[in-house]
Image: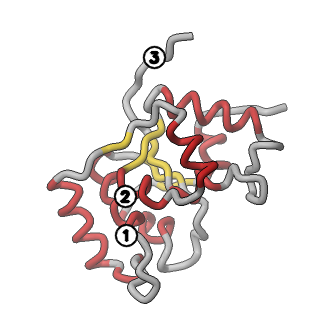
Amino acid sequence: MELIQQKPKYIIDASSMISQKSDEQYRRLVYKNLWEHIENLINSHVVVTCSEIVCELKDVEITDWFNGLDFLVLPICDEVQANVKKVVTSYPKLINFRELKSSGDAFLIATAIKYDLIVITEENPKRENRIPYVCRCLGVKCTNILGLCENENWDFM
């Protein structure tokens, strides 16, 4: 079956990709049809990601899954870099300098701003140092996998 290429609509965070693991909320063993739907959106480039999020994928199982798909990884350009600067200047708690974790979250949001994408993340929306909170403050649309299902009118009955 040939997939129709569409304009990107969503940008996905590592937390959402990881949620398919056997010890996570949307484990593939239980939600196989859900992940088939998500993979269709990935392969048709409706769901994309950015290179900094790819760098956060340390799990072999998730990396193998990612590499087996036609995942569009949006590049980091000058406009995204400028957006990152605005994001981290306004919300410095988004980056944890003590643990020296990836700055993927800022790049995810900055890329969403450039391309007017909806961010998909499983992060806690109530915590100030998390993606949903920063997105809300910046006027960037943000949802989780359940919200993606609702947005796409998926029914798994």
Q: Position of residue 45 (x, y in %)?
A: 43, 31
Q: Position of residue 78 (x, y in %)?
A: 15, 55
Could you tell me which secondary element the residue under label 1 belongs to? loop
Residue 104 in the image: x percent, y percent? 39, 64
Alpha carbon distance from label 1 to label 3: 32 Å
As helix, strand or loop, the secondary structure at mark 3 comes to: loop
For mark 1, does the 10 Å Cα neighbourhood hold few (<14), some (14 to 19), or many (20 or more) residues?
some
Amino acid type assigned to the residue bearing label 2 in the image: Glu
| Labels 2 and 1: the sequence-earlier one | 2
Q: Position of residue 83 (x, y in %)?
A: 23, 62
Q: Residues within 10 Å of mark 2 (few under 14, many from 20)?
A: many
Q: Residues within 10 Å of mark 3 (few under 14, many from 20)?
A: few
In this rendering, the label closer to the viewer, 2 or 3: 2
Q: Which residue is mark 3?
A: 4
Compared with 8, 84 (above or below) is below
Residue 107 lies in quadrant = bottom left
- Of the 4 image quadrants, the one containing the C terminus is top right
* Residue 114 appears left or right of 38: left
In the image: residue 139, left or right of residue 29: left
Residue at the far top in the pictured view: 1
Badge 2 is on which residue? 52
Q: Tag 3 or tag 2, which sits nearer the N-term?
A: 3
Instruction: Give left or right: position of 93 versus 26.
Output: left
Mark 2–mark 1 Cα distance, whole angstroms, equals 7 Å
